[in-house]
Amino acid sequence: MLPLWLIFYVMTRSFKIITLGCKVNQYESAYFDENLRKTGWFRSSGREPCDAVIVNTCVVTTRAAHQSRQAIRKAIRENKHAVVAAVGCYAQAFPQELEDIEGIHLIADNRTKGRVMDLLQQHLSTRTKTVALQPYEPDTPYDFLKISTFPGRTRAYLKIQDGCESFCSYCIVPYTRGPYRSLPPEKAVSMLAAFAAQGVKEVVLTGIHLGKYGNDLAEGHTLNTLLDRIGKEHLPLRIRLSSLEPGEIDDALIDSMADNEWLCRHFHIPLQSGDEGILNRMNRRVTRKYFRRLIQTIHARIPLAAIGVDVMAGFPGEDRRAHMNTYSLIRDLPISYLHVFPFSARPGTPAASFKAPVDPGTIKARAADLRELGWEKRMRFYESCLNHSFEVLVETWQDPEEGLVKGTADNYLPVIFPSHTLDQGRLVRLRIERISERGVVGNRCAASGPKP
């Protein structure tokens, strides 16, 4: 049991959590938030200095690593008397770089994230710097970080998978997240039921390599079987899937999305390149032909599904022909939006030492070309949704003075609509009427109906 002075100390202490990177990090930060509040800490509500800052780091790109270091140094500078913790992927991959930053009190990698609250309490008692590192092993178990609420958001995230073993040549993630691990289906369903009981209307199923869900569980457990089980629960919420590799989207998943209103019509697919040679250098397990057929199949079966694609510009060895292979593949397919990433060498990955690097000016120009194409695709997608109705999750005010609210449809369409009240977190059915300078504009429907 903690001494009385320490209990009083903790119960008068405030904290901030700074999260960089992916939805998995956001879920894990929600775990930190909930458990700190359970032990008497309170969340800082503004810019004032607080007593503990947790920076949940990301190193997926050199830019992300730089942003993580910036966030850590800013936390140290603005919270001079705080306990500053740097946790997550940065600590897993490059702990020495963090140890060299003066002012960090706790360094904890991904394997020790579940102990961060205990380590903070330990620091309060000992006032000694703590470095908690634990390498991944082949039989590393899934670390279930259970939460009961998801703070500050209209939708919740549920991490059901961790780890990656793909080893794309540009990617540091397999080194920071370890082998495939999955949340057992009964625990996933229990978490979803708990969210539904709180009135949550949308949950995003997320993972480091979501399509590999179930690989470490008993034979027969897959993402499809988990979705089948979720469907049988008839929960009053809708499910959105985070990123899925092209080879992990099969006909059964497409059919399930087409046939079930509770499953959001939204695929986010990492392609990275549309050139066979570059895909091989990237160690990507997809071909142009397969990708083209997949996108055409999705669009034919679910015409109003959002299909987002990740693409990289300027990978080593990418000449103009390779770039145009990517550009033309995307141009000719019914893709809804793009996330464009300029290549930057990530130390610790094979691609960092590849020959034939592309000069930064060319990378910037190619990324701009792809972003412009992505905008054109987005506008065409918006136009395809005109005169259709959608269930929209209400998120926040667009303009409270004008009575305009914004939300997101099941197919990831952002919608602005007039409303006297902000029914945040509620689902409303809207008919899409026009596209304005502000975005896609809708109005409430008198009655609901099936997916268009």
Image (cartoon, rainbow, N blue to C red):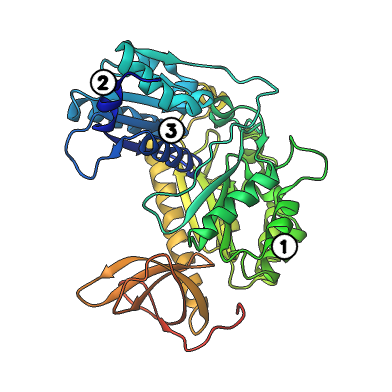
Write down the residue under mark 3.
Answer: 58
Position of residue 231 relative to residue 82, above or below, is below
- x, y percent for residue 243: 58, 49
If the image is split into quadrants, where does the N terminus sit? top left
Give the mark, 1 or 3, whose residue is nearer the N terminus. 3
Mark 2 vs mark 1, foreground winner is: 2
Between 140 and 331, the one nearer to me in the picture: 140
Instruction: State the residue position of label 2.
Output: 5
Tell me which amino acid carries mark 3. Cys
Residue at x 67%, y 43% (from the top left corner): 276
In this view, the mark in front (3 or 2): 2
Q: Earlier in the sequence, mark 3 or mark 2?
A: 2
Alpha carbon distance from label 3 to label 2:
36 Å
Instruction: First in sequence, mark 2 or 1: give its number.
Output: 2
Residue count near mark 3 (Cα–Cα under 10 Å), binned few <14, some 14–19, many ≥20: many
**Could you say where residue 137 lies in the image, as x and y percent from the top left?**
65, 19
Q: Are marks 1 and 3 in contact (CB under 8 Å)?
A: no
**Crowding at mark 1 (Cα within 10 Å: few <14, some 14-19, many 20+):** few
Indicate the amino acid at tag 2.
Answer: Trp
Q: Residue at x 36, y 20 (%)?
A: 2
Q: Position of residue 100 (x, y in %)?
A: 33, 13
Disc 1 to disc 3, how far (Cα)?
36 Å
Provide the secondary structure element on which disc 2 rests. helix
